[in-house]
Image (cartoon, rainbow, N blue to C red):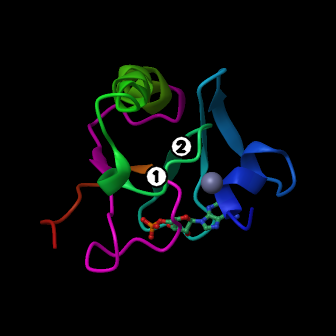
Amino acid sequence: MDCVFCMIRDGKIPTRKVYEDDKMLAFYDIEPAAPVHIVMIPKEHIASANELNADNAGIVAHIFSKVPEIAKSVGLDGGYRVVNNCGADGGQTVFHIHFHLLGGKTLGKMA
Ligand code: AMP
Ligand code: ZN
């Protein structure tokens, strides 16, 4: 499959990993939009938030349950923002669901 994040999951594209377990992976964004910019993905390929349902949405809770630990490990002591871009109008460019973890400065208003 031609999915950048599946290739990262499979070790075919190198990244700076910050967290990994059997269900998810977190790594530094290649084009940071903030001083600290982490991308958190499920290992399961789900194209976007628009493909979530009662059967697969447990992964979202799992990812969020790890946010405090990941944020602490990258030094986001003053707070942070978690963002999901969904679909063309949402600005999504990689169609493997992911959550951006942004911080390292006082962030501006959204959108
Ligand atoms: P989005 O625009 O919400 O779909 O976010 C996709 C993010 O993935 C962007 O912030 C990209 O900079 C990031 N990205 C794309 N390819 C890579 C890569 N090989 N390693 C790390 N981050 C990547
Ligand atoms: Zn994928």
Work out which residue is located at the far bottom of the displayed protein and give it.
89
Where 91 sits versus 4, above or below?
Answer: below
Numbered disc 2: secondary structure? strand
Numbered disc 1: secondary structure? loop
Q: Quadrant of the N terminus?
A: bottom right
Indicate the amino acid at tag 1. Ile
Give the magenta-colored segment's residue range.
73-96
Check if residue 90 falls in the magenta segment.
yes
Which residue lies at the image location 73% right of the left edge and 68% below the top edge? 2
Indicate the amino acid at tag 2. Ile
Mark 1 closeness class: few <14, some 14–19, many ≥20 residues within 10 Å: many
Residue ID for mark 1: 97
76 left or right of 111 in image: right
- Image quadrant of ligand 1 equals bottom right
Residue 51 location, x and y as percent?
36, 51
Residue 52 location, x and y as percent?
33, 43
Q: In front here: 57 or 19?
A: 57
| Rendering quarter of residue 50 | bottom left
73 left or right of 87 in image: right
Which residue lies at the image location 81% right of the left edge and 44% below the top edge? 10
24 left or right of 12 in image: left
Q: In front here: 34 or 45?
A: 45
Which residue lies at the image location 37% right of the left edge and 28% below the top edge? 55
Mark 2 closeness class: few <14, some 14–19, many ≥20 residues within 10 Å: many
Q: Is residue 2 visible?
A: yes
Where 110 sits versus 70, above or below?
Answer: below
Residue 45 location, x and y as percent?
58, 47
Residue ID for mark 2: 41
Considering the whole magenta stretch, tell me its main secondary structure.
loop
* Whether label 2 touches label 1, CB < 8 Å: yes
Mark 2 beta carbon near ligand 2 (under 8 Å): yes
